[in-house]
Amino acid sequence: MSGAHVTPSRPVPGDALLHPLVFGAVLVLILNDHVLKARYASWWTGKLSDVAGLAMFPLVLQGLWEQVRARGARGFRPSSRVLLTCVLLTAACFGAVKVSQTAGDGWRWALGGLQWPARAAWALASGRGVPAVVPVAHVVDVTDLLALPALLVAWRVGRRRCADDSRAHGGPSTRLLPMAQAPSRG
């Protein structure tokens, strides 16, 4: 069918998480945190988790926002503004827990609380009692900030998705620049 126009499929809320780089980052994070750190604990395994987490977490936040947005009365389209907000929020929170003991302790307990339902279900299925919520292990380490450039992976994947949707629907999904710019002539 030469010359046939193929319309790209409409994006699905959270589908950026299916991008091979993001999927790979999740696999690296799981493998590193549950195998490599236990067997080969080092400075490198610590940084590897940070890089993998930063490469995917803004897209998790964006996906959650998109799921909520898609359930609302208005339609869903990937948003560069939402993506930027998610990247900046991730950077700020990551930075805080890496330089502040208080923020780090909050993170330990918050993540421990998020993990508790799965731990409780596993304990009940195994015939044991329900465990208490326990904080996860966390080390405040300013050198972990070296992983912040990994946010560029999430930014690039997310921006490409926003741009693809914009091209597919004949215009920008959400601009980061003011709309008052005059179109170029030529």
Image (cartoon, rainbow, N blue to C red):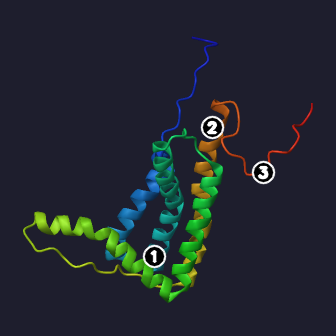
> Percent x, y for residue 153?
58, 56
Residue shown at 12%/67% (left/top)? 124
The amino acid type, in three-letter code, at marker 1 is: Gly
From this viewpoint, is residue 17 visible? no
Residue occupying the far bottom of the picture: 101
User: What residue would you read off at disc 3?
Assistant: 177
Residue 122 lies left or right of residue 143; in this view the side is left
Q: Nearer the viewer, residue 72 or 165?
A: 72
Q: How many marks?
A: 3
Cβ atoms at labels 2 and 3 below 8 Å apart: no
Where, quadrant-wise, is the C terminus in this rendering?
Answer: top right
Q: Residues within 10 Å of mark 3 (few under 14, many from 20)?
A: few
How far apart are the two marked residues, 1 and 3, measured between alpha carbons? Answer: 37 Å
Q: Nearer the viewer, residue 100 or 81?
A: 81
Where, quadrant-wise, is the N terminus in this rendering?
Answer: top right
User: What residue would you read off at disc 2?
Assistant: 164
Residue 46 numbered mark, or none? 1
| In the rendered image, the vertical position of residue 126 relative to residue 6, given as above or below | below
Residue shown at 49%/83% (left/top)? 103
Give the structural element (helix, strand or loop) at label 3.
loop
Residue shown at 73%/51% (left/top)? 176
The amino acid type, in three-letter code, at marker 3 is: Leu
Give the structural element (helix, strand or loop) at label 2.
helix
